[in-house]
Image (cartoon, helix red, strand yellow):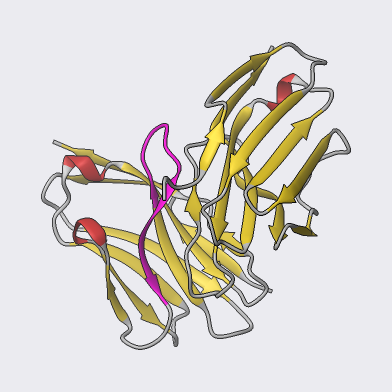
Amino acid sequence: DAGVIQSPRHEVTEMGQEVTLRCKPISGHDYLFWYRQTMMRGLELLIYFNNNVPIDDSGMPEDRFSAKMPNASFSTLKIQPSEPRDSAVYFCASSFRAPNTEAFFGQGTRLTVV
Amino acid sequence: AQSVTQLGSHVSVSEGALVLLRCNYSSSVPPYLFWYVQYPNQGLQLLLKYTTGATLVKGINGFEAEFKKSETSFHLTKPSAHMSDAAEYFCAVRGNAGKSTFGDGTTLTVKP
């Protein structure tokens, strides 16, 4: 397996524009997580899915953020409209259900909103 | 509820010196504990994990960690630091609900 694949790796957009980040988890994994990492706030869990169903979205900062998982092999995180304070590295991770298993992270998407 | 505290956001050691990164956790169920490493411009990757059994766990790159239930600790050590160990290290606990809770991370600097 190629691991967790995120696209794009880098995104620069203007304030007010819609941004969509994409993630392909490892085949067979039950869980998918979206994280945001900044210098100020560290690593934050935004939302996670179990078998394509959102379980906990309490970390989503505002209504401008939304995430979907239409099938087991694809998820998106959308920001509309984007703001400069959304600039961060966004990671997708996936794992098996068993709590003794680790999460596998993608390479991240570095988002810059100007 | 579960939580993780990493003591020291920055640790600096000389090459060849002992590396000790501290992690304390709280968990209402038997914990599953993990250490991840993040190199610049990369995602997190697993260093080692404790699930059950032996409390001293060995990981990649010569790192190991010891689970001490009485101290609720899972400190990460390496006998001799190498320049390539410079990175950010995260301790995490995973509960039965599937979610992992990460510490704030410790940046390790290795001086020549």
Residue A65: x percent and y percent?
A: 81, 37
A58 is higher (above) or lower (below) than B82: below
* Magenta highlight range: B37-50
Q: Is residue A22 left or right of residue B111?
A: right
Residue A111: x percent and y percent?
A: 62, 24
- Residue B77 located within the stretch drawn in magenta: no
Figure disc tally: 0
**Residue nearest the observer in this picture, A82 or A4:** A4
B6 is higher (above) or lower (below) than B84: below
**Residue nearest the observer in this picture, A64 or A76:** A76
**Residue nearest the observer in this picture, A13 or A53:** A53
Residue for point 57% across, 26% down: A8
Quarter where residue B42 is shown: top left
Residue for point 63% across, 69% down: B98
Residue B27: x percent and y percent?
A: 60, 78
Quarter where residue A29 is shown: bottom right
Residue for point 50% across, 63% down: B92
A16 is higher (above) or lower (below) than A104: above
Residue A39: x percent and y percent?
A: 55, 34
User: Looking at the rendering, in which quadrant would you find the C terminus of chain B?
Assistant: top left
Prevailing SS of the magenta stretch: strand
Residue for point 45% across, 42% down: B43
Q: Residue furthest right?
A: A63
Quarter where residue B7 is shown: bottom left
A6 is higher (above) or lower (below) than A4: above
Q: Is residue A62 left or right of residue A28?
A: right
User: Looking at the rendering, in which quadrant would you find the N terminus of chain B?
Assistant: bottom right
